[in-house]
Image (cartoon, rainbow, N blue to C red):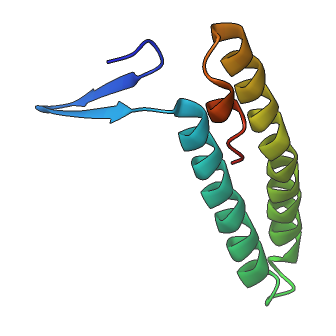
Amino acid sequence: MGDTDILIRIGHEEIVLRRRYEVLSIVNDILIAVWFIIGSILFFSSETSTVGTWLFLVGSVQLLCRPAIRLVRHVHVRRVGSSSAEASDDF
């Protein structure tokens, strides 16, 4: 395993996360979709539209996190000295 791998033990099983910034970006995208889907459903009722609005706000803030994750990844890759081909991946 490389220095950037993350190992999670669950009982007798192990989950190895490689390319942690890509995984972080994917998880962020899934959460954005979840917030917007739930927020949209909550907008069908006037009683829950305030909660729906808050979920839209959370999703919007997470949209801001997407480029921040990419920027952190690029800075990290350059600092470590990995190949420039990996640094050009866009998530």
Name of the residue lying farthest toward the bottom: 44
Name of the residue lying farthest toward the left: 12
Residue 33 lies, with reference to residue 41, above or below; the image says above
Residue 72 placement, left or right of 1? right
Give the image location of residue 22, x and y in percent: 58, 41
Give the image location of residue 52, x and y in percent: 81, 71
In the image, 47 versus 27, the foreground residue is: 27
In the image, 28 versus 43, the foreground residue is: 28
Which quarter of the picture shows residue 33?
bottom right
Residue 25 placement, left or right of 62? left
Determine the residue positioned at 69% across, 73% down. 38
Residue 16 lies, with reference to residue 28, above or below; the image says above
In the image, 87 versus 11, the foreground residue is: 87
Give the image location of residue 69, x and y in percent: 75, 35
Quadrant, the N terminus: top left
Residue 21 lies, with reference to residue 55, above or below; the image says above
In the image, 78 versus 11, the foreground residue is: 78
Number of marks in picture: 0
Determine the residue positioned at 10% across, 31% down. 12
Determine the residue positioned at 53% across, 32% down. 20
Determine the residue positioned at 77% across, 19% down. 75
Which quarter of the picture shows residue 13?
top left
